[in-house]
Amino acid sequence: LPLPTLRNFSVSALFDDIRLLFPEKSDILFFHVKPEDLNLYADRIMVEQVLINLLKNAIEACEESLSPQIVVEAVQKAGMVIISVIDNGSGIVPEAIDKVFGLSVCRQIMNRHGGSISLDSQVEKGSSFVLRFPIVTKRIL
């Protein structure tokens, strides 16, 4: 993976762009940003790639759900920007967690940003992926 090109960008604008990529899922995809003007200093393209991978997995996991729901939320907490992708899909069996599609790329991207990705999943109840980015303020020389 290349080094990230770090820039300050609006998380709300990122979520708006991602929402446009899944128009047929607008009834099950919910995006929340708090505060609404939350910014992230990161490589926007890489972060978008991580979120698209996670959303594709979540959509697939929800295919058998009677009332599928996927929530993508971003908050600022304890010196971190935390983005969560939570679904009520089929969940991931413990043996398959390391083999989740795209997770290794997602983990590498998060490492490149000095952040982390974690997963909590329960079979037949759903999964929650949590991305943690350190808050970095751009230094002006």
Image: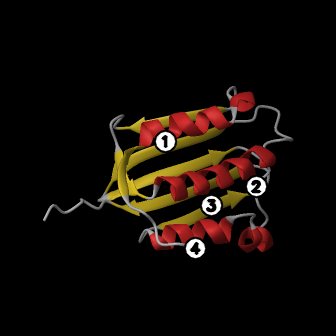
Which of 109/76 is in front? 109
- Distance Cα–Cα, label 2 vs label 1: 26 Å
For the residues bearing labels 2 and 1, Cβ distance under 8 angstroms: no
The structure's colour scheme is: secondary structure
How many marks the image carries: the answer is 4
Is residue 64 found left or right of 67 in the rendered image?
A: right
Q: Which residue is mark 3?
A: 120
- Distance Cα–Cα, label 2 vs label 4: 28 Å
Q: Nearer the viewer, mark 4 or mark 3?
A: 4
Among the two numbered marks 3 and 1 on one chain, the one whose residue lies closer to the N terminus:
1
- Disc 3, SS: strand
Q: Quadrant of the N terminus?
A: bottom right
- Under mark 1, the amino acid is Leu
Q: Which residue is mark 1?
A: 14
Q: Nearer the viewer, mark 1 or mark 4?
A: 4
Q: Which residue is mark 4?
A: 1
Q: Which residue is mark 2?
A: 91
The location of residue 115, given as percent across then percent down, is 44, 68
Kindly give the residue lying farthest to the right in the view shown. 64
Height in image: 69 above or below 109?
above
Q: Nearer the viewer, mark 3 or mark 1?
A: 1
Kindly give the residue lying farthest to the left in the view shown. 141
For the residues bearing labels 4 and 3, Cβ distance under 8 angstroms: no
- Distance Cα–Cα, label 1 vs label 4: 21 Å
- Distance Cα–Cα, label 3 vs label 1: 24 Å
